[in-house]
Image: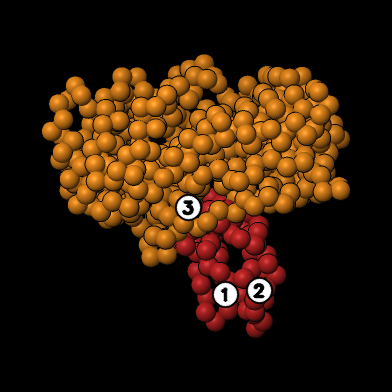
Amino acid sequence: MKKEYDIIVVGAGPAGSMAARYAADKGVSVLMLEKDRDVGYPVRCGEAISKAGVEEFINIDQKWIAATISKFGFVAPDGSEVFIDFGEAGYVLERRIFDYALAESAAKAGAEILTRAYVNGLIIENDIVKGVKYEFRGEQLEVRAKIVIAADGVESRVGRWAGLKTHIDFRDMEAAAQITAANIPIDQNTLYFYFGKDVAPNGYFWVFPKGNNKANIGLGVSGITGKKKSALSYLNEFMEKHYPDAPILTSIAGGVPCSITLDKISAPGIMLVGDAARQVNPLSGGGIASGMIGGSIAGTIAGDAIKQNNLSHILTYDKAWADRLGKRHEIFNRIKNGIYNFSDEKFNAIAHSFLKVPEEKRGLGNLFVTALMNQPSLLVDVAKVFFVK
Amino acid sequence: MEFRQAKTGKLMIEILPNKCDFCGCCVGVCPEDAIELKEAEISIIDERCTNCSKCIWSCPIEVIVFNKTGVLFQR
């Protein structure tokens, strides 16, 4: 290990690994630090991703694919089920293997990686970030860098130490409880989403197949709901009702920051990527693909900044992200605020009227249109997402 | 018997021992950066905490509670 790197990445999730890889591809020196023992573990995620979201970054490898998804199933509060066929739409991943593969690709590009390295402060000189302080096997150490990329996830502390406002409104934090269970007899190519105030108020409850009748099951609840009832209680009630005897293989807590991207995701010497930058798609809560996109943009810009010896180039990252996805997420966020406030009666009515649409004409676009017939203002947003290219 | 002191008086936010899953929700919503979270170790930074309770509302598995009488130092 060196005493100084061009770029240090804090956190080895998908966003961090892509930042490290794209930077290293530019031929600069990169160190990625991970606080946990293992890259990719523990998994705090629903693990679903679109086909396009993966393929932009890595060749499909069956060893990290748990299930291939071709259908979405929406379950209304009264039990009405709506299915939409997409063809080959996406995957449910084995994140512990997937994240590992992404980190390997960063290593292959030339990045150094160190696990069990807990970053607990920044080196700041003249208001510019110059490296990180970290604890490694009981020792407090420092390592310098020209650029620090914070990929430290939902906590997002590195950004705050650099003076960026990264703390998230408790209403936008989807606190999640999830399990991997066995003997769940669902279609292995369908993602199931349950709606309703008793199941997942202001959000959705997911049951995602993981092959051989295993499933990733869970939900996130906003802090508003969390004041009264925790995600864990909702999860326990769901399992009791639907799968009381299912063996539980893993059970874990997590958090999804479901908001628009932070106002500022770069500052002198520092860039934020992934959950740390709040780059999650606020409508779906999906953050793997968007995190990888954020990471790749940041890594590329950081690498160029070093190569061109022009560190202020990193400040172009905010706009590059906004143009690629950030602005789109603002629309998704407005749709989220509309949809997730629907009453149970409304969800039921949507399901019933959608079931009247001829099967061959059913698509996600017209599901939303059905959903929003009484919300003209939201319809404009939906049109922007689905119909305006 | 000595109470821990938060920024705004007695500390009333209590992280129940041996229950935490170290997911980071509480850290993300804390406006004061008053929670330290390592791989499998969590603690409140007393002098930064304002007892605002956002961490309690954002804990998915009911690990953080509001202790009205105040949190005691552990021996």
On the image, the x and y values in percent for residue A147 come to 77, 35
Q: Amino acid at mark 2?
A: Ala
Q: Are marks 2 and 1 in contact (CB under 8 Å)?
A: yes
Are labels 3 and 1 assigned to the same chain? no
On the image, the x and y values in percent for residue A122 come to 78, 48
Label 3 or label 1, whichever lies nearer to me, is 3
Q: Residues within 10 Å of mark 1 (few under 14, many from 20)?
A: many
Q: Amino acid at mark 1?
A: Met
Q: Chain of mark 3?
A: A
Colour red maps to chain? B
Q: Look at mark 3 in the image and give the residue it sits on.
A: A172
Q: Residue furthest left?
A: A356
Colour orange maps to chain? A
The vertical placement of A101 against A143, above or below, is: above
Q: Chain of mark 2?
A: B
Q: Residue at x 23, y 38 (%)?
A: A370
Q: Chain of mark 1?
A: B
- Camera-nearest residue between A43 and A131: A131
Q: Earlier in the sequence, mark 2 or mark 1?
A: 2
Q: Residues within 10 Å of mark 2 (few under 14, many from 20)?
A: many
- Left or right of residue A71: residue A355: left
Label 1: state its secondary structure: loop
Label 2 or label 3, whichever lies nearer to me, is 3
Q: Residue at x 47, y 46 (%)?
A: A258
Q: Look at mark 1 in the image and give the residue it sits on.
A: B12
Q: Residue furthest top?
A: A59
On the image, which quarter does residue A82 sit in? top left
